[in-house]
């Protein structure tokens, strides 16, 4: 497409130049989710020179490199697709609502000429339906191949989750899908030197090839919390022919795939990335659903990025037939703050594996130091009466959820205090039965007024047990 700078966007470019670093800000998947929570990514960003001039190499966000079967429309979807691709493609039924991934300002909304020539030498289906949103920072999200009508106009503001258009196959497309692309510092389409970055970051064990274009770092840009499950933006799965969705597991959903011994052609994989408030020692727990014929040697890859941007990968082999129906700790590691740790699971299992399937379910991250501080501050601890898990998301700007588990019937009191110790709100004061419960705080005080941004304390008590957690409200 040929984009001309819009005069009303000068303020946006000025503001973007003042941003130095970026925390995750993408809050919504860019489409209305189906009944089974997520559409997989079929074609991912090529980190090795993602331009309209293919160079014969395709590099994924996890560092895997492909040189065979990488030509657009002929490559194995979700594996090596495709050379020069500058975004992530979600295939879905025609006219699926397309959603804004974050709050922003519409800078482009038009049917415009697409790439010239189209990848793979196909003929375009007319002009491409394109919407581009500026997010008041360095980043622009781009939504391509939309059908008419486009729901938004240039100059309008949108909130995360707003319907901005509808999925189609306009422009360079052979089937209905959404091309979701993130550009940094500029919204222009440049076929030779693109402004592209990958919102899934870079988790390879060598320097990210995209840096050679404009020097951009690829960061994980999806908002997250301490627990990540199907449907959350911090869990993303990738296309393969044999995914099965099951109504069982954490939050009554999970995915399974047949095991594989072919690492080079692994077709099913997923990634979980938390947004950790503090650095420290964390337990990494995985939920194992009660499913028959699971593998005894699933291989979880735990990737940690240090302050210099260097990734280190640890592989943990897990028997998914043990501890079914709950969380089990697979590793205890020192993790940095922010979104600098990723867990990747594939269909490839260890050589001594028995069982037929790999299960993909929730992953959670428990800060052991915070648990010790909370325990030391407790006036009296009754073991096995109550467990309070870290709130998520944290920091938050609209709602944060506190999840707790009651092992015996108990009166639960949950209150919010400000940094000076002043009582802000009583969220719960009632008898609760055994089981898991949650409560969402929307940042209001007892008078239903939104409190100022800042640090707050969530205090949960039950039969002498007292748990204190820090919660940060950012508006």
Image: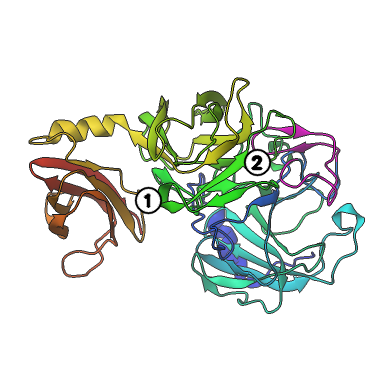
Spot occupied by residue 258 in the image (x, y as percentages of width and height): 64, 38
Secondary structure beneath disc 1? loop
Residue 326 pos. (x, y %):
37, 39
Q: Mark 2 points at which residue?
A: 268
What range of the chain is rendered magenta? 55-79
Q: Residue furthest top?
A: 352
Q: Can residue 218 be seen in this view?
A: no
Residue at the (63%, 21%) spot, across then down? 351
The 10 Å Cα crowd at callout 1, few under 14, some 14 to 19, many 20 or more, is many
Specify how the rendered protein is coloured: rainbow
Is residue 70 a member of the stretch shown in magenta?
Answer: yes
Q: At x 37% / y 30%, what residue is drawn?
A: 283
Q: Check disc 2 and report its element: helix, strand or loop.
A: loop
Q: What residue sits right under mark 1 in the picture?
A: 393
Give the side of residue 352 with respect to residue 283, left or right: right
Task: Name which residue lies at 64% across and 31% down.
Answer: 348
Within 10 angstroms of label 2, few (less than 14), some, or many (20 or more) residues?
many
The one of 233 and 14 positioned closer to us in this rendering: 233
In magenta segment, residue 156: no
Q: Which of 115 and 382 is in front in this view?
A: 382
């Amino acid at each position: 497409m040929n984009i001309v700078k819009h005069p009303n966007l000068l303020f946006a470019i000025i503001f973007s130049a003042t941003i130095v670093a970026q925390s995750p800000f993408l809050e919504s998947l860019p489409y209305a989710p189906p009944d089974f929570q997520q559409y997989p990514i079929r074609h991912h960003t090529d980190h090795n020179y993602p331009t309209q001039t293919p160079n014969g190499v395709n590099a994924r966000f996890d560092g895997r490199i492909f040189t065979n079967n990488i030509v657009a429309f002929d490559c194995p979807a979700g594996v090596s697709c495709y050379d020069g691709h500058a975004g992530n493609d979600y295939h879905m039924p025609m006219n699926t609502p397309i959603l804004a991934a974050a709050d922003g300002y519409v800078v482009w909304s038009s049917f415009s000429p697409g790439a010239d020539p189209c990848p793979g030498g196909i003929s375009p289906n007319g002009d491409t339906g394109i919407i581009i949103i500026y997010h008041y920072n360095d980043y622009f999200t781009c939504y391509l191949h939309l059908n008419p009508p486009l729901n938004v106009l240039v100059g309008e503001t949108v909130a995360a989750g707003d319907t901005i258009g509808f999925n189609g196959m306009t422009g360079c497309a052979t089937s209905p899908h959404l091309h979701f692309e993130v550009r940094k510092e500029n919204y222009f389409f440049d076929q030779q030197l693109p402004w592209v970055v990958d919102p899934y970051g870079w988790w390879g064990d060598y320097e990210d090839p995209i840096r050679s274009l404009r020097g951009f770092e690829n960061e994980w840009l999806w908002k997250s919390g301490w627990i990540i499950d199907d449907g959350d933006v911090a869990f993303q799965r990738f296309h393969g022919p044999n995914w099965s969705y099951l109504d069982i597991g954490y939050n009554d959903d999970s995915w399974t795939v047949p095991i594989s011994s072919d690492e080079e052609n692994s077709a099913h994989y997923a990634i979980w990335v938390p947004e950790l408030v503090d650095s420290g020692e964390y337990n990494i727990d995985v939920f194992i659903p009660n499913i028959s014929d699971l593998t005894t040697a699933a291989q979880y890859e735990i990737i940690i990025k240090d302050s210099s941007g260097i990734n280190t990968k640890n592989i943990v082999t897990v028997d998914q037939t043990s501890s079914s129906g709950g969380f089990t700790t697979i590793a205890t590691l020192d993790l940095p703050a922010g979104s600098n740790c990723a867990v990747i699971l594939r269909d490839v299992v260890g050589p001594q594996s028995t069982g037929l399937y790999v299960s993909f379910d929730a992953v959670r991250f428990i800060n052991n130091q915070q648990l010790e501080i909370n325990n030391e501050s407790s006036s009296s601890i009754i073991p096995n009466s109550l467990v309070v898990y870290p709130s998520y998301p944290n920091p938050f700007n609209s709602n944060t959820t506190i999840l707790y588990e009651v092992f015996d019937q108990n009166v639960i009191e949950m209150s919010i205090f400000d940094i000076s110790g002043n009582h802000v709100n009583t969220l719960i004061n009632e008898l609760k039965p055994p089981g898991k419960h949650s409560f969402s705080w929307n940042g209001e005080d007892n008078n239903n007024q939104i409190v100022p941004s800042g640090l707050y304390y969530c205090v949960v008590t039950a039969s002498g047990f007292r748990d204190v957690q820090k919660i940060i409200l950012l508006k």
